[in-house]
Amino acid sequence: MTTLRRRMIEDMQVRNLSSHTQDAYVQQVSQFARHFNRSPEVLGPEEIRSYQVYLRKERKLAPSSIIIAVAALRFLYKITLHKDWSLEEVIPTPKMPQKLPIVLSPEEVLQFLGTVRSIKHRTILTICYAAGLRVSEAVCLKITDIDSQRMVIRVEQGKGRWIAMSCFPQSCCKPCVSGGEWKGPRGGSSPVMQPAATSTGKP
């Protein structure tokens, strides 16, 4: 192990970086040094720029992968080698592309739900999708949380807090519960909800 690698590892340990991060940084710096077959101590901004171009154009790495190399080199030159460079200029971070989430049309949602044979599972999926429930919230739902008369559902938020969400009219539930209604363990049907959190407070 070289003196520089030992110093960098010690610097990461002092700052309590995770072992996964330490391994990733050491690997990235090692690849950088092998690319030029020289110690990073004698490499400067021009070599760093050349290496980033190499990662992007020749290795065709995604921005998320290049960001790991950037983070490792920034740690090496700022913390371990104490360079007073403007790191944003010398070792720039690639911009991550903005990806819009896939939003299904109402027809696509109905088509998806129509493939679920179990009425119970179909209703649960409709509730989760329409209300935007977290997984942790959905798995804790009980039939007593659903008020089919007022068409609302109560979602516990912890420490006695809850959110009331309004629901679709029963006429909109037909695609979901066609062929019968899902009866919970204590009876009562489960309506479909629209994504509208309305209030917080005590029940």
Image (cartoon, rainbow, N blue to C red):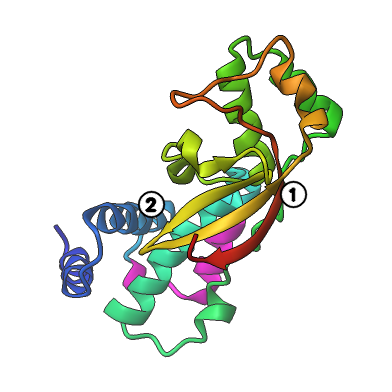
Image quarter for residue 7?
bottom left
Is residue 54 in view? no
Give the structural element (helix, strand or loop) at label 2: helix
**Which residue range is magenta in the image?**
40-53
Viewed as shown, does residue 182 lie left or right of 72? right
Residue 191 rendering spot, x and y as whole percentages:
67, 33
Residue 197 rendering spot, x and y as whole percentages:
65, 57
Give the structural element (helix, strand or loop) at label 1: loop
**Residue 156 within the magenta-colored segment of the rendering:** no
Q: Nearer the viewer, residue 66 or 146?
A: 146
Image quarter for residue 73?
bottom left
Q: Is residue 64 above or below residue 180?
A: below
- Residue tagged 2: 31
- Residue tagged 1: 100
Residue under the point 51% across and 75% down: 45
Residue 49 rendering spot, x and y as whole percentages:
57, 67
Q: CA distance from mark 1 to mark 2?
A: 33 Å
